[in-house]
Image (cartoon, helix red, strand yellow):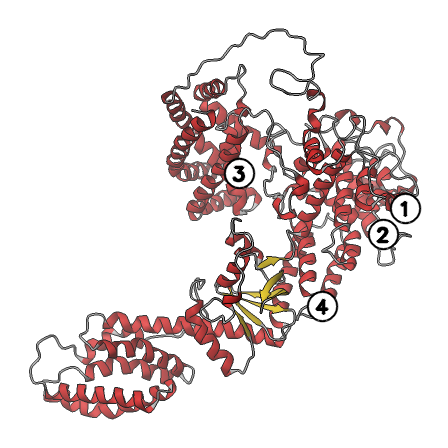
Amino acid sequence: MLPREVLGASRQVLEQSFQAAIENLIPHAIEALFAKASSSSSAVEQATVFQTRYYLQEKRQAILEKMQFFLRMLLDRGLETSYAHFRPASNILTQQADSLSLLDSMRFEETLRFNSITTLLRNQADQQLNELNLRISTLFGQEDIRERENPFRPYIFARCIEQAIESMRFEADIANLMVIYLSEALGRSISDIYQQVNADLARQGVEAKLIVKVKHNTDVSNTTTGKFGHSAFANSTSHYGRAAVVAAASGFPAMSMSSVPSLKDFISLQRGRAACAELNQDGQLNDSEFSWKSDKFALGDVLRRIFGKDDGRFPEGSGYTQFLNQTATNVKTRDLSFPAALLPLLKELQSEAASSGMLASERFASQSVLLKLLGKMHKQWVTEQTGLLNARGDLRNLLVEQRQNLRALTDKPEQQMLIDVISMLFESVFADTLITAELKQSFARLQFLYLQLALMDSSFVLAPRHPARLLLSRISSVMLAVTAHRATEREFEAEIAKIFKTLARHDCEVPGLFERIHTRFDIYVEKELRVQDKAIRRAVKSVEEAQLRYQEQSRLSLLISRPLADIPLAQQFKNFLELEWARAILLAARQSESQMQRFCAFVPDVIWSIQPKPSIEDRLLLTDKLPELKSCLQQGLDLLNWNNFKQNALYGWLNDAHQKALNTVTTGGTVLSQVELQNRFALLLRHIPLLCSEGDLSGEYTAIRPFLSAVTAEIDLAVHYLESEAYNTDAAAIPIALKPGKSFDSKAILDKLIAGTPLEIQYEGNARRACVHWSDPHACVLILSVSGVSEPVIAEQKYLLQQFSRSQAKLIEPGPAFERAITTMIRTADHLESQGQGNYPG
């Protein structure tokens, strides 16, 4: 068997052992947390611990499922790369923007805590792990033992726990406690898991012994290829591996090894030489090499690592240190004075912090001073009067203009790195064709603010759901959606202008600045897109009313059908009570509560009326009740709009049933009294109407549709429908799938279909732009505005997903704006490495 096949079989054993081990994981963690809370003397810490225990109990199943999910993903990756000569690499130039997922955050790997957890699991596994490492090296015929090549190493378990907890989005303190105590609990079972994997490998004939090979000292200096066909030159250029692959695949000439990519080259590739020359009028880019980067790694790989898109080229838990040039810790610090352009701001800081002594030395600025300077540059240098366009009409990159001044105030390569990375990020934002020119100018005003944030908060570059990233993406998406649709664009522009004014007045030292603004903007978008247009507002209310009526009628039918189950009654009359009369009760409830209660009481009374009446008292009582029963029934039939034929048929059947009841002296079965029937239907008699819809209605559109038509007709609302074959007369005209083999993730699409999402759909045979105005919380419909259609469009969610799967609908944005910028930056870096200098467009 091949090594991959052997590992595949052992993987199943590991997954089964892991599944068995995690059954007791939560109880052990809760027990340990209880002990921690008992020994803690801090009330705040105790509250955090108790809250962590609560979430572990409440979210137990979800956490365990996510742990297994992420373990499978990590195992998939590990099995692909075990002792691989080259790590898998894709051609970035041929990928779409949405194919570069940045969700693989490396946030925890850069902390001592994560390394400690990995070490803990390694120590707990002890000899079993050593034996497993030996078996894996034997399986691949290797002389040396490298734990990194073991696809089942402790790192996999630590990583699956942290990813599972991170995906639940708990508060930071709670998430940290969960990761630590779940890892410690898993440590109890880790040795047993490895023992079972070792036993399976032994069963497959994989021994725990080291292979020793005799190496012959052969001179290959004059040969072009070695024994295995690899170029003798490969080792000297290995760090350009990805760039070489990109260059070969895209037809660009290979990059000269003497070429060192720089920020100037990056901007030239983005803007063209002439635009870059305009940007470099004062020589800001004359010394623009990435001196903070180690020559061992290509720029594209470094950017992947920075933004959490690591592909295994870097050792686990190494942070940025692996690719940083530690000798470039600002060589100019030997005789450094503050840049003249920044002296006014520095003096202002001195006057504000004279008592603290923070600026006691004018030879070098501390990290805190650099952050405060960036805050002042943001608030004072970038105002509404600041011109953001250069002579060519291009947007100014303010970070590039101040690059030399800012670098003069740094003492770490990480700071220099972030200055260049954020500069390149904004270059990519400026190049995005889906962002309007007006928005780009507004985003350009935030350059110093975002650099300050990147220096203050390391999670900004790693976390795709960081509020600052989400805010930029959300604003871009909403403005793209409302530009040509029903929502008043001016009102959204005014609201977004308020956001930028707020950001202009504050810097990142304000706690939760971006989070609060993003939350408020989300609420504003959801509200305005729902109520701003009268027709949209009425369409939303119509859907809500239709869903409420459907659920109310279903509930009434259930309250009637359950007590009727064992009562001998003609099936046709049962159907009438369960379906038609339930609808009559629903209609009566809209008139008055007393009328609804009267219609509910009709059910047990009419059933009693057609049962045998052997006693004189029952016969007399029936004679007294018949006029009231007939009156109530007639009012109900009028509400139901029954024609004379149907009414006469029902009255004829009831007349015969009453005659039979009066003429029956003896009964062959149990006859329920009026009181017994009323007790049976007690829930119906005490029925309280629903105030709002409840539950998931994703599969109920067909049943709700008649109610929706009735509601829109009642209020005289004109709407269009986008729905499946049952109602869609144009369904036959839908083309077959354009990409029948393409995988389709409906949940991923639904998560993106929120208010303010721009999309393109097939409508009446044409591709049209659309905007989501309202997404039904019960997963039944969405309300859209569609270009060229004056009325709201009510789209069946299931049918819209079918259009996505058939490639008849698509999101206009291939990904969030911020993530597109990161993707563009990485692709440009790969292109730069592969193309080499001297080939940029002019």
The location of residue 42, given as percent across then percent down, is 53, 41
Compared with residue 124, is residue 354 higher up or lower down, i.e. above or below?
below
Task: Using the rendered image of the protein, determine whether residue 302 is visible from the camera's viewpoint.
Answer: yes
- As measured in the structure, the alpha-carbon distance from the residue carrying label 1 to the one carrying label 2 is 9 Å
Q: Earlier in the sequence, mark 2 or mark 3?
A: 3
- As measured in the structure, the alpha-carbon distance from the residue carrying label 1 to the one carrying label 3 is 47 Å
Q: Earlier in the sequence, mark 2 or mark 4?
A: 2
Q: Nearer the viewer, residue 680 or 295?
A: 295
Q: Nearer the viewer, mark 1 or mark 4?
A: 1
Q: Earlier in the sequence, mark 1 or mark 4?
A: 1
The location of residue 58, given as percent across then percent down, is 43, 49
Query: In the figure, is residue 240 to the left or right of 165?
Result: right
Compared with residue 462, is residue 317 higher up or lower down, i.e. above or below?
above
Query: In the figure, is residue 751 to the left or right of 264?
Result: left
Q: What amino acid does circle 1 point to? A: Glu
Secondary structure under the numbered disc 4 in the rendered image: helix
Secondary structure under the numbered disc 2 in the rendered image: loop
Q: What amino acid does circle 2 point to? A: Asp
Q: What amino acid does circle 4 point to? A: Glu
Q: Quadrant of the N terminus?
A: top left
- As measured in the structure, the alpha-carbon distance from the residue carrying label 2 to the one carrying label 4 is 25 Å
Quickly name the residue at label 4: 489
Query: In the figure, is residue 354 to the left or right of 238?
Result: right
Total numbered labels? 4
Q: Which mark is residue 162?
A: 3
Given contact means CB atoms under 8 Å apart, are the residues at marks 2 and 3 in contact? Answer: no
Quickly name the residue at label 1: 278
Q: Nearer the viewer, mark 1 or mark 3?
A: 1
Identified at 44% across, 28% down, the residue is 5
